[in-house]
Image: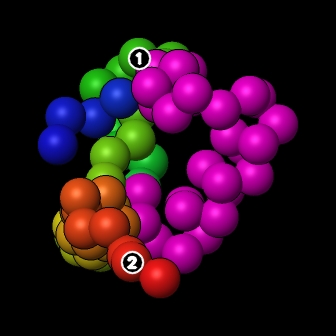
């Protein structure tokens, strides 16, 4: 994945600033995203770790399971 700045990640997440910061800090603390060198720029860039990519795969599979068209008859 291509490194992105924090503002871009927030806009893509569709979360408000307060909620985004809470989740972002949690993801960073737990090793799902890391800060990477920004090549001398003052902008900090972040990217998904291998652990973060694994989490994304699991969440995509869970979303597929929940969005299946099967209707439960009662």
The reply to whether residue 14 is in sight is: yes
Q: Is residue 55 above or below residue 35?
A: below
Residue 16 rendering spot, x and y as whole percentages: 74, 28
The answer to which image quadrant residue 30 occupies is bottom right
Describe residue 47's horizontal placement relative to residue 57 as left or right. Answer: right
Residue lying at 28% horizontally and 35% vertically, measured from the top left: 3
Which numbered tag is attached to residue 73? 2
Disc 1 element: loop
Quadrant in which the N terminus is drawn: top left
Describe residue 11's horizontal placement relative to residue 71 as left or right. Answer: right
Q: In the current view of this chain or complex, which residue is farthest to the left?
A: 1
The residue nearer to you, when weighing 11 against 73, is 73
Q: Is residue 74 above or below residue 61?
A: below
Q: Earlier in the sequence, mark 1 or mark 2?
A: 1
Residue lying at 31% horizontally and 58% vertically, measured from the top left: 67
In three-dimensional space, the C-alpha distance between marks 1 and 2, rounded to whole angstroms, equals 58 Å
Residue segment shown in magenta = 6-33
Residue position for label 1: 41
Please name the predominant secondary structure of the magenta segment in the image: helix
């Amino acid at each position: 994945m291509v490194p992105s700045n924090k503002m871009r990640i927030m806009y893509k997440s569709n979360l408000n600033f307060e909620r985004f910061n809470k989740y972002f800090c949690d993801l960073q603390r737990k090793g799902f995203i890391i800060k990477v060198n920004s090549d001398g720029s003052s902008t900090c860039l972040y990217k998904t770790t291998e652990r973060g990519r694994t989490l994304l795969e699991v969440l995509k599979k869970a979303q597929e399971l929940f969005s299946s068209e099967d209707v439960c008859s009662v």
